[in-house]
Image (cartoon, rainbow, N blue to C red):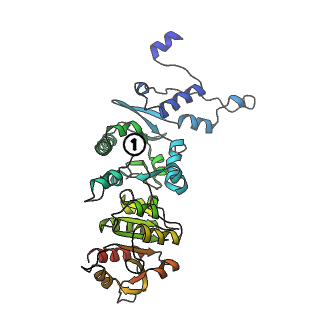
């Protein structure tokens, strides 16, 4: 009755109405009017299975869809949705972004796991980068999903402290970091969620989510074609090109090493691992978001971009790492000759199994690392680090 509703502050609603309310709070939580409203579900009655009333029966799947949409938690001045089910549409989308390169390219989004990597990405740029380069590399944070601190375990499952000090501190600190870089307008374009441990496991792709405090969706940086890139970027001098390097750990390590030795750009050839693969992002410590990158589809595009766009000389300062070739230290000294007006250098690395493609290797200058030991070859990331060091400290 009306009087009973006023006294107990409770209201009755059917499944469809409740689902609509949950959906509104989950996906319209950024609305200022919605922020002032909060509710709690006290009691639920589900119809039992019956052959005569199958149309009104709420199945387990419908029940999960209804209550896994989101619940809400109020923290001072805002309302943040809680993702409590891995079957939630938002959770599925984030998980797909992490695992699917095609979906990442379609959505122009990348998933980052952990606040440490996110903070490194949000830095203005590599150490010593110009203000112009820093502005180009500003990254938009599309959404943040904070892990809820586990407080206790009940008989029915996991229980969480919605307003835990750890979660609040992490969230507020990241908000300040993002605001310092992107300005206050960034918050209006960003969605935020809390996620339980089960959801965080799916989002991060790990067996144990205890050490993961957040998952973030970031805007994917632009990767241009080699000719377009070389024509637009006139100050490119040191370039690393990866020709078919497929291991994400090696690609991430090479990106990080190239940044450390002051390389200006990294080229990604056919069959090279996606630099925004989750393992690659972890091993690169976010370098893919700061380093300028370009790609090529055919060897003809590669040669045209370097020679016509970048004014590189194929048989002089475009170098292929090979098992047999000129001593890398001697080539580095030659390129560092004071009479040399062109200080550009391009280092090409191939996969450990196949090496640099035959057409590219035969058209450029081959160099090698002298190894007096009995080992036939080095890991591509190790070899790349040695060669980049040699070409930097000339």
- Asked if residue 304 shows in the view, the reply is yes
Please give left or right for residue 168 compared with residue 18 in the image.
left
Q: Residue at x 47, y 72 (%)?
A: 303
User: In the rendered picture of this protein, how many numbered marks are placed on residues?
Assistant: 1
Quarter of the figure with the N terminus: top right
Residue 61, by quadrant, is: top right
Which residue occupies the foreground of this view, 326 or 21? 326
Give the structural element (helix, strand or loop) at label 1: loop
Residue 315 place in picture, x, y as percent:
41, 81
Name above or below for residue 303 compared with residue 3.
below
**Left or right relative to 56: residue 189:** left
In the rendered image, residue 237, in percent from the top left (x then y), is placed at: 33, 68
372 in relation to 112, above or below: below
Question: x%, y% of residue 208?
Answer: 43, 54
Q: Position of residue 372 (x, y in %)?
A: 34, 90
**Residue 88 in sight here:** no
**Relative depth, front residue between 32 and 392:** 392
Q: Is residue 167 left or right of residue 37?
A: left
Between 35 and 186, the residue placed more toward the observer is 186
Q: Residue furthest top?
A: 3
Reading the image, the residue beneath label 1 is: 148
Q: Quadrant of residue 364?
A: bottom left
């Amino acid at each position: 009755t009306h009087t009973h509703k006023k006294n107990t502050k409770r209201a009755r609603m059917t499944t469809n109405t409740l689902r609509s309310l949950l959906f509104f709070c989950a996906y319209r939580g950024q609305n200022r009017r919605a922020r002032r409203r909060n509710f709690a579900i006290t009691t639920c009655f589900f119809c039992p299975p019956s052959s005569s009333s199958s149309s009104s029966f709420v199945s387990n799947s419908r029940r999960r869809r209804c209550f896994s949409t989101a619940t809400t938690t109020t923290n001072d001045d805002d309302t943040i949705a809680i993702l409590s089910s891995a079957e939630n549409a938002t959770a599925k989308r984030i998980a797909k972004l992490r695992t699917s390169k095609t979906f990442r390219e379609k959505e122009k989004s990348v998933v980052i796991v952990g606040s440490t990597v996110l903070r490194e990405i949000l830095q203005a740029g590599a150490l010593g980068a110009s203000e112009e380069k820093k502005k180009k590399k500003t990254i938009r944070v599309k959404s943040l999903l904070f892990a809820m601190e586990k407080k206790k375990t009940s008989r029915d499952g996991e229980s969480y402290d919605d307003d835990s000090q750890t979660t609040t501190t992490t969230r507020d600190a990241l908000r300040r970091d993002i605001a310092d870089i992107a300005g206050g307008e960034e918050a209006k374009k960003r969605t935020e969620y809390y996620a339980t441990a089960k959801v965080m496991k799916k989002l991060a792709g790990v067996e144990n989510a205890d050490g993961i405090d957040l998952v973030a969706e970031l805007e994917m940086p632009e990767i241009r074609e080699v000719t377009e890139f070389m024509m637009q970027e006139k100050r490119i001098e040191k370039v690393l090109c990866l020709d078919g390097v497929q291991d994400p750990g090696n690609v991430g390590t090479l990106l990080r090493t190239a940044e450390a030795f002051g390389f200006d750009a990294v080229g990604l050839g056919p069959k090279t691992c996606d630099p925004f693969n989750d393992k690659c992002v972890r091993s690169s410590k976010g370098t893919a978001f700061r380093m300028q990158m370009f790609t090529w589809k055919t060897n003809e595009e590669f040669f045209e971009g370097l020679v016509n766009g970048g004014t590189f000389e194929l048989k002089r300062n475009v170098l292929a790492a090979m098992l047999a070739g000129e001593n890398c230290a001697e080539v580095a000294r030659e390129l560092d000759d004071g009479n040399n007006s062109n200080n550009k250098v391009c280092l090409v690395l191939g996969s450990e199994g196949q090496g640099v493609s035959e057409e590219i290797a035969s058209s450029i200058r081959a160099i090698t690392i002298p190894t007096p030991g009995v080992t036939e070859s080095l890991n591509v990331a190790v070899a790349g680090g040695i060669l980049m060091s040699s070409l930097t400290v000339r």
